[in-house]
Image (cartoon, rainbow, N blue to C red):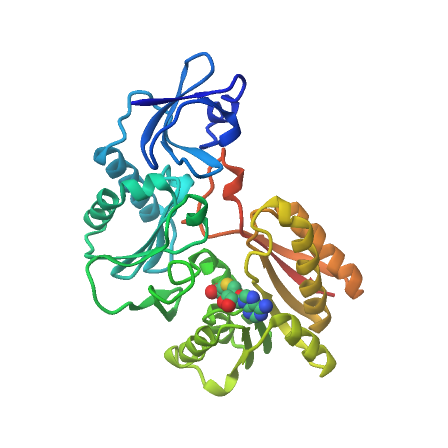
Amino acid sequence: MKVIRLRAGKDRSLLRRHPWVFQGSIEKGKADAGETVRVESAEGQFLCWASYSPESMIRVRAWSFDEHERIDAAFFQRRIAAAIALRARMPIASDAVRLIHGEADGLPGLIVDRYGDTLSAQFLSTGTERFKNVIADLLLEATCLTRLYERSDANVRTLEGLQPVTGWLRGEGDTEVVIAENDWKLSLDVAEGHKTGYYLDQRDNRKKFADVVRHYGCQSVLNCYSYTGGFSVAALAGGATEVVSVDSSGPSLARATAHVALNGFDPARHTALDADVNHTLRDLLKQGRSFDAIVLDPPKFAPTAAHAERAARAYKDINRLGLMLLKPGGLLFTFSCSGGVGPELFHKIVAGAGMDAGVDGLILDRVGATPDHPQTLYFPEGEYLKGLLILKR
Ligand code: SAH
């Protein structure tokens, strides 16, 4: 077993159970891509078993802090079983669930979503890449399923020196799947959809949106960055009579339109707008339009804290326009999925947007990701999705 020796004082974060070691913290030791290594402090004390990634800034990702544990098939079986057992205890109103959420489930670099009878997985680190076949078989065994589609085409793989890989890893067939989320039917394509196919982290917020649209009697709804229209279906379910979905992806909008019919809603209540949100918000203002509720769920503007400043301006701008387009008494459901923008900063940005728009608002709710996307106490990078539900006074 190869040993990675850390520099003096660089053991602190592993001792606090943070699972990453950066390149600069390593005194000596090398291994192959994905090889399991023993990580020791400068004094030679055992810190963790980990996978080694020779090309990544995150050189080491911890598998286990238990010196007696072996990193073998049985280890992966235990971690997978624990993650799935946890999901079974969670209140999840869907047959589409995130089964493995990377670091939070003790499996850094592994993302696995279940969509009905199909698994869709991302192997994002050299460690998960090395154990891919073992993990794939164990996942199918643990879920009693036969199909696993690989979506290892996320950009972060390049930082690991890994090529993108997509396709059926186990099983075969149609990549189109229909799932039941809350009270709705939604379709997705595990080969063509974003990430693993769909954004499961917003499941509870879509339900919440349907509820507030009903409670507050919202009629007109603008869903910005709609993707396949999850929040639009929620708005229609909540009784909205006029819903506009805006996205710059044509195929996603086509699916949003299909979802309106799939759920039995009158197509006349929904409009799909293939456009840039920034332009659309300005155009709608010029046209004098206004809405009872607006959703802003943009893509990640700030992947890391280094991008936070530019991202803050972009968030502020869309939130300012969104608040201006709301009718008095209307609701803004606004999100950021940028890891580099924390909840406090996001609150400040939206407050700044309110100031610039000259409107007063009340925070009715603060929300995060669904529980199947958990965060450990010791890994702050795990917090990414945050949202505010704001009432315009
Ligand atoms: N709210 C969605 C997920 C949104 S993901 C859900 O509940 O499923 C972000 C979406 O923003 C993607 O569909 C992407 O196509 C879209 N997008 C990114 N930049 C955009 C832009 N400038 N204008 C419009 N849409 C954009």
Tag count = 0
Q: Nearer the viewer, residue 184 or 69?
A: 69
Residue 317: name its quadrant: bottom right
Quadrant location of the N terminus?
Answer: top left
For residue 386, say whether it is visible: yes
Residue 361 on image: x %, y %: 73, 60
Residue 37: name its quadrant: top left
> Which residue shows up at 58% across the image and 58% down it?
335
Residue 118 on image: x %, y %: 27, 60
Q: Nearer the viewer, residue 392 or 283?
A: 283
Q: In this view, does 75 lie to the left or right of 188?
A: left
Q: Which residue is most to the bottom?
A: 268
In the displayed structure, 197 sits above or below 270; it is above
> Which residue shows up at 66% across the image and 59% down it?
315
In the displayed structure, 282 sits above or below 116; it is below
For residue 327, say whether it is visible: no
In the displayed structure, 185 sits above or below 54; it is below
Residue 145: name its quadrant: bottom left
Residue 121 on image: x %, y %: 33, 53
Quadrant location of the C terminus?
Answer: bottom right
Q: Is residue 195 left or right of residue 327?
A: left
Residue 333 on image: x %, y %: 60, 63
Q: In this view, does 30 lie to the left or right of 174?
A: right
Q: Nearer the viewer, residue 154 or 312?
A: 154
Q: In this view, does 359 lie to the left or right of 62?
A: right
> Which residue shows up at 65% across the image and 70% down it?
278
